[in-house]
Image (spheres, helix red, strand yellow):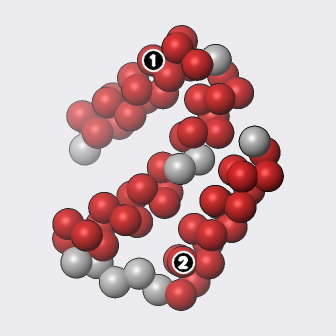
């Protein structure tokens, strides 16, 4: 559990160094959508309609920001 946190925070900081804070923060918004997709494809988790709507809201918000 701690390893996942260390890796994700390290990746965020690396992204900030390479892309700058605004671009890194927008890309980090995809984390929720990617996590849902991985859990569904690898672990067979069921994705509810509410979760799909939330994912769409995130994608729309990221699209509007760009």
Q: Residues within 10 Å of mark 1 (few under 14, many from 20)?
A: few
Can you identify the residue that label 2 sits on? Answer: 52
Element on which disc 1 rests: helix
Q: Residue furthest top?
A: 17
Q: Is residue 56 left or right of residue 48?
A: right
Q: Residue furthest left?
A: 43
Specify the quadrant that holds the N terminus.
top left
Q: Residue 33 appears at what percent x and percent y?
A: 49, 60
Q: Spatial distance from mark 1 to mark 2, Cα to Cα?
A: 29 Å
Q: Is residue 10 left or right of residue 45?
A: right
Q: Residue 64 appears at what percent x and percent y?
A: 79, 52
Q: Residue 61 appears at what percent x and percent y?
A: 74, 56
Above or below, comparing residue 42 to residue 48 in the picture: above
Q: Residue at x 48, y 27 (%)?
A: 12
Above or below, comparing residue 29 to residue 2 in the picture: below
- Residue 47 position by quadrant: bottom left
Q: Nearer the viewer, residue 66 or 43?
A: 66
- Residue 57 position by quadrant: bottom right
Q: Residues within 10 Å of mark 2 (few under 14, many from 20)?
A: few
Q: Residue at x 66, y 22 (%)?
A: 21
Q: Residue at x 47, y 86 (%)?
A: 48
Q: Nearer the viewer, residue 66 or 27?
A: 66
| Residue 14: image tag | 1
Q: Is residue 65 left or right of residue 37?
A: right
């Amino acid at each position: 559990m701690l390893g996942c946190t260390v890796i994700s925070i390290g990746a965020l900081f690396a992204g900030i160094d390479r892309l700058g804070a605004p671009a890194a923060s927008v890309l980090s918004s995809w984390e929720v959508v990617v996590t849902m997709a991985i859990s569904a494809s690898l672990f067979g988790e069921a994705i509810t309609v509410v979760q799909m709507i939330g994912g769409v809201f995130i994608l729309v918000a990221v699209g509007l920001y760009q």
